[in-house]
Image (tube, helix red, strand yellow):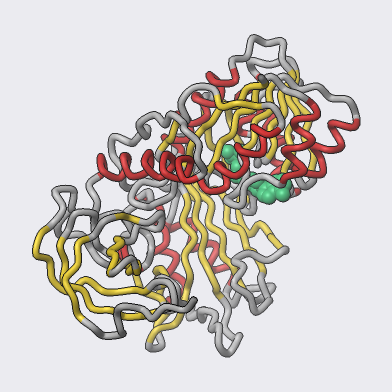
Amino acid sequence: MKTKAPVSKNERLDVTITDLTYQGMGVAKVDDFPLFIENALPGEDITIQVTKVQSHYGFARAIAWQSESPDRVKDVDKTYRQTGIAPLQHLAYPAQLKFKQHQIEELFSKAHQDVDVAPTLGMANPTQYRNKAQVPVRMIKGKLETGFYRQHSHELIPLTDFYIQDPAIDDAIVKVRDLLRQFEIPAYNEISDKGVIRNIMVRRGYYSHEMMVVLISRQQKLPSQDQLVDQIHKALPEVTSIVLNVNAKKTNVIMGNVTRTLYGKPTIEDTLMGLTFAISARSFYQVNPQQTEKLYQMAIDKAGLTGQETVIDAYCGIGTISLALAKHAKRVYGVDIVPEAIEDAKVNAQKNHLANVEFAVDKAEDQMAKWQEAGIKPDVVVVDPPRKGLAESLIDSTAKMGPKKVVYVSCNPATLVRDVARFQELGYAIDGPIQPVDQFPQTPHVESVTVLVKK
Ligand code: SAH
């Protein structure tokens, strides 16, 4: 049955916001037809204008407020919402933490599961926390600019203060931008597929203050490359690594396959949980180091290790969780799909004098099946997958190995709910409350730790 939408494009109407989506948009219902509205909070009465109507939902813009939420933060810079850098900046931080807890509760309850979710563990200062920036570079009116795209577009909005990033990184991006201008190195143009610099990535160790600058280029060699590199490390004394990444393809993927160190080392070092980690340009490394330590401590505590256990860390990245657990376990196996991450993980095991770890490059789902066939019997399995969650086959091989505990670190509650249901079918049950840890303040991303035990 096809029903007609009760609203039409450009129509203005008064609504009450009843919900906030997991992307942080306000929801108002007109005769059960949901409208999604940016910068609108639950409880607010707003005059809106409809901007887009689809068959089952629509979008609208907030025009005027008749009443405001007590949780609204006033005088925020709308650029951070438009770019998606901080889509929840207009929601007071304690309410953001409740929102994240509620997201998990609601997704489980929609799946008819009654779970206990603990209050989200937040930050004392929920800004300037990111240790990594990845910014697009474009020419605007003949001038090279760095900033962020307007959401759902490739329109660059120039920015110098990124609000949630380490300010030393913001400063580095401006200095690199100015040097690129000075040497007249052109930015990449996506439409003509010409130009040179596509993106700049900067990572800074939270404890070490070592800084890596990655220039992502369409060309194998930059114009004035030697002078540019020389000037970058002169302008930024913290820089211990300058890397060129070549991406010659017409693609939205940021990095290409070729990476060359132009100055210093191919990695920077930082510490987490008292362990030292080398991190190369293409390896994943948690972006919020302060919260990561809380998250890992939680995972370690929940794993309940005594020193006698065999542990698998699937999706191990550069081995951060693996090595933190290795101190308390008999043996740890880690797997990641990115070869550079596993190279880093092996170096990191040596750096920290941990010999009871073994790392493999593979798809986690395939490696788990191999370990299961090889007869490895883990006591604890830790999984920390990307947003798409676990492959069903990984859950199956895990259950066949029969660990007493599975510690699931999730960055997407929707796939967590799905995967937990699969574990339950195979004889596992949730143990204790799910613990959200706010890794991404000012954004709607929800990170959590769940423990499953074998019944
Ligand atoms: N536990 C690590 C990394 C978590 S991020 C940490 O806390 O730092 C997720 C990791 O999964 C990334 O390192 C990514 O390279 C890896 N990955 C993504 N898909 C994968 C797959 N199918 N198999 C194995 N690893 C995968």
Quick check: 69 above or below 157? above
Determine the residue positioned at 58% across, 90% down.
192
Which of the image's four quarters has the C terminus? top right
Classify residue 446 as left or right of residue 18. Answer: right
Q: How many marks are shown on the rendered structure?
A: 0
In screen coordinates, is 384 left or right of 296? Answer: right
Towards the viewer: 75 or 137: 75
In the image, residue 423 sits, relative to residue 300, either above or below, namely below
266 to 181, vertically: above or below? above
Split into quadrants, the picture shows ligand 1 in the one at top right
Which residue is located at x 66 percent, y 71 percent? 247
Q: Is residue 278 visible?
A: no
Q: Residue furthest front?
A: 1
Q: Position of residue 165 (x, y in %)?
A: 38, 52
Q: x, y percentage for residue 246?
A: 67, 69
Q: Position of residue 162 (x, y in %)?
A: 34, 59
Pick the residue in front: 29 or 324: 29
Q: Residue furthest left?
A: 66
Residue drawn 69% across and 27% down? 427
In the depicted view, which residue is nearer to us: 117 or 408? 117
Q: Nearer the viewer, residue 161 or 19?
A: 19
Tell me where residue 179 sits by quadrant: bottom left
